[in-house]
Image (cartoon, rainbow, N blue to C red):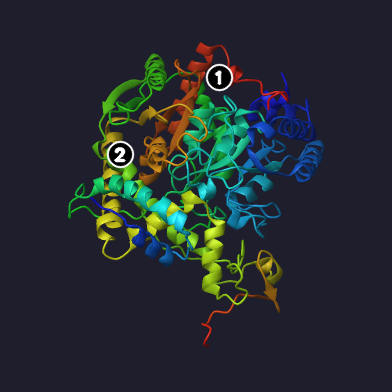
Amino acid sequence: MSIIRRTAAEIADALATGETTSVEVTRAHLDRIAEVDGAVHAFLHVDAEGALEQAAASDARRAAGAPLHALDGVPIAVKDVLATEGLPTTCGSKILEGWIPPYDATVVRKLRAAGLPILGKTNMDEFAMGSSTEHSAYGPTHNPWDLDRIPGGSGGGSAAAVASFEAPLALGTDTGGSIRQPGAVTGTVGVKPTYGGVSRYGLVALANSLDQVGPVTRTVLDSALLHELVGGHDPLDSTSIDQPLPSLVDAARRGATGDLTGVRVGVITELSGDGWQPGVMTRFQESVELLVKAGAEVVEVSCPTFVHALATYYLILPAEASSNLAKFDAMRYGLRVWPEGRPDASAEEVMRATRDAGFGDEVKRRIILGTYALSSGYYDAYYGQAQKVRTLISRDFEAAFAKADVLVSPTAPTTAFKLGEKLDDPLSMYLNDLATIPANLAGVPGISVPSGLADEDGLPAGFQILAPALADDRLYRVGAALEAALTDQWGGPLLDRAPELNGDVR
Amino acid sequence: MPEITRDEVAHLADLARIDLSDAELDHLAPQLTVILESVASISGVAGDDVPPTSHALPLTNVFREDVNTPCLTPEQALSGAPAVEQQRFSVPRILGEEA
């Protein structure tokens, strides 16, 4: 089997036994990127030279018997919202076009310290605002399952990169579902860790109280390996949890044995019904039955406030985003645009012209919305009320986790839709995050695992598992058990059924 | 039902320091009204007795030892600046014409 189709864990093993080298593996992925990324457009920047240099250094360490980590030499792609010293970081926005950060995000520093060659930066909705990657100022990413469809968002680039075998691993960020929903629609695995479980230092903030960095991979075990590598306490992030992560790799290996005896699985009543695609629901029910077969006990749980989660999120997020994005003021970094024919313009006029030219439609919508929600006279009715509903959502989770060890739902209500279909219909775009948003509001961890292909369109659907805060290990145990049962049923990984995407497309 | 007029959007854009064109104002105002109508559904969901949550997990103050730690050099800090002069960020004039 071609090296690029192997999992990160398998590549790590092949490096450890000397079957291959990091330079070979990295070159194979760069070749694949050169072959298919014209059609997929998962990358905004590819650093072939840097990645090969890092790979050669990794090989030298292996030869000297001193690898830095089990994943030393396994290449990775990084979402363009994470600061990378020496590599452009645009957040999918024109306002940061060409910006090269003078420092690394903590998660990137950890990747480098473990010896993972960085292939490049992946495409995303501008400042992570979107569910389709169509709001990228640099053009959309295409879903490797059907190039006319969206790869999900905001991290469509990272998901498409692993789904099209351009990278074995990627980092994403999840504020309302930006790791899990792209995972669902591309047939890949994505994890949003517990809030505070992975450092946000060097992550360009969308909504501080919701953002989390997490793994984007093809298997549950690979996510566990990457999560353990990038997670843990960071003194540079004041919201970072100051305690060790649970053992995630062990949990994934234990889950893969297929035994879930004694695990209580709660099916969330409110995350089904009208608006949920029948094929997505069928795959979901099937997965629940497989968990039962593995020994899990299934109960139905109600989280009544979840129906208000979307509205809550679309008040809290724009409010936080509008203040976060105030830093793009054309003074210290990024774009500076002078009003036309006004060389004597003031700083404020330059700021206005720059923000108009540099921000796209969705970013402007959310800044205006956030500014509105935070204005005096509306604050209590909107932002204040949303913060209270957030409390109720957390209480719903508490009550549900008293009855179940993990909660489950489909990750997204539908499979991938056509590019352009919802681009100018913000509300219908927002509905994609219906099932993923509650976890961000409450800070609990979640994973999306492929559940199969929907009958009506043959496109991937996702199965979401949620766990209580700090119990990320449960995601990996249950996720790996489901993955093992489904892979067994399919007779191989789901991605074996995706189109080959050889050079002949487009 | 909340409605957000074109003038209100123009005012908000002004507060947010974004020069929106007429075409953008025409386009954004109705979209924002639809979004606001949809999020207005949360009014009355939580009573006065419900405390607000600003962060999912409780936050505590974080302190560090008061010692110097390595930081960006002036060159690094200025490396992304649109304009630099005498090792400083060079900005457009900040006072009005009359000043």
Query: Which chain does tag 1 point to?
Result: A
Q: Earlier in the sequence, mark 1 or mark 2?
A: 2
Q: Is residue A46 visible?
A: yes
Mark 1 and mark 2 residues within 8 Å of each other at the beta carbon: no
Query: Which chain does tag 2 point to?
Result: A
Q: Are marks 1 and 2 on the same chain?
A: yes
Q: Please state which amino acid type lies under the numbered disc 2.
A: Phe
- Mark 1 vs mark 2, CA separation in Å: 31 Å
Which is more toward the observer, B67 or B88?
B88
- Helix, strand, or loop for circle 2? helix
Residue A168 position in % (x across, y down): 65, 32
Q: Is residue B56 visible?
A: no
Q: Pointer 1: what residue? A: A494
Q: Nearer the viewer, mark 1 or mark 2?
A: 1
Residue A6 left/right relative to A57:
left
On screen, residue A387 above or below A166: below
Residue A277 left/right relative to A58:
left
Instruction: Place residue A382 in its image quadrant.
Output: bottom left
Residue A182 position in % (x across, y down): 51, 34
Instruction: Place residue A275 in its image quadrant.
Output: top left
Residue A112 left/right relative to A283:
right
Q: Pointer 2: what residue? A: A397
Q: Residue, x 53% and y 13% (percent of image)?
A: A490
Which of the numbered marks, if any, corresponds to residue A164? Answer: none
Which is more toward the observer, A360 or A481?
A360
Q: Tag count in the figure?
A: 2
Q: In what quadrant of the picture does the N terminus of chain A appear?
A: top right
**Which residue ends up furthest to the bottom in the rendered image?**
B99
Q: Please state which amino acid type lies under the numbered disc 1.
A: Leu
Q: Residue, x 53% and y 26% (percent of image)?
A: A187
On screen, residue B38 above or below A180: below
